[in-house]
Image: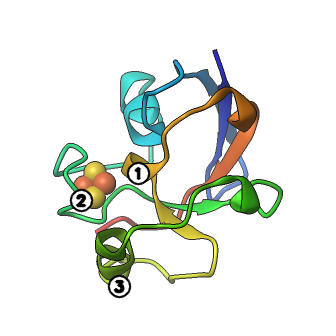
Amino acid sequence: MPRIVFVGCDGDEHAVEVPVGVSAMAGAIRNNVRGIEAECGGSLDCATCHVYVDDRFIARLPEPSDIERDMLACVAADRRETSRLSCQIVLTPELEGLTLHLPEVQS
Ligand code: FES
């Protein structure tokens, strides 16, 4: 089971194991990771699951869809080149150790 490391804006790390095929957002919610709100439950309608993907992993992720790109315009914190919506990051074995930095605010 791949492990995801969520890094809070205060530097605190929270490592969780998430089954292949499950989204990083769902992994965070199931493991009570603070800093992911996911108000829409993963239907690409809220942008409150925003994360900054660590530079080491950004090239391993598929490109965001047009809808995800549109929703990234709605994030509450700074949008960066590494910004993604965690409900759209689906775990694969290749993402072992995926590191996601949490923004200061989600809404
Ligand atoms: S959970 Fe709402 S857009 Fe990701």
For the N terminus, which image quadrant? top right
Rendered image quadrant of residue 55: bottom right
The answer to the question of whether label 2 and label 3 lie on touching residues, with beta carbons closer than 8 A, is no
The answer to the question of whether label 1 and label 3 lie on touching residues, with beta carbons closer than 8 A, is no
Residue 104, placed above or below residue 79: above
Q: Earlier in the sequence, mark 1 or mark 3?
A: 3
- Disc 1 and disc 3: Cα gap in Å? 15 Å
Give the label on residue 63, or none: none
Give the label on residue 44, or none: 2
Label 3 neighbourhood size at 10 Å, few (<14), some (14-19), many (20+)? few
The answer to the question of whether label 2 and label 1 lie on touching residues, with beta carbons closer than 8 A, is yes
Determine the residue positioned at 43% across, 28% down: 22
- Disc 2 and disc 1: Cα gap in Å? 8 Å
Q: Amino acid at mark 3?
A: Ala
Rendered image quadrant of residue 46: bottom left
Label 1 neighbourhood size at 10 Å, few (<14), some (14-19), many (20+)? many
16 relative to 107 in the view: left or right: right
Residue 84 percent location from the top left of the image: 50, 64
Residue 54 visible, this angle: no
Residue topped by disc 3: 73
Residue 1, placed above or below residue 27: above
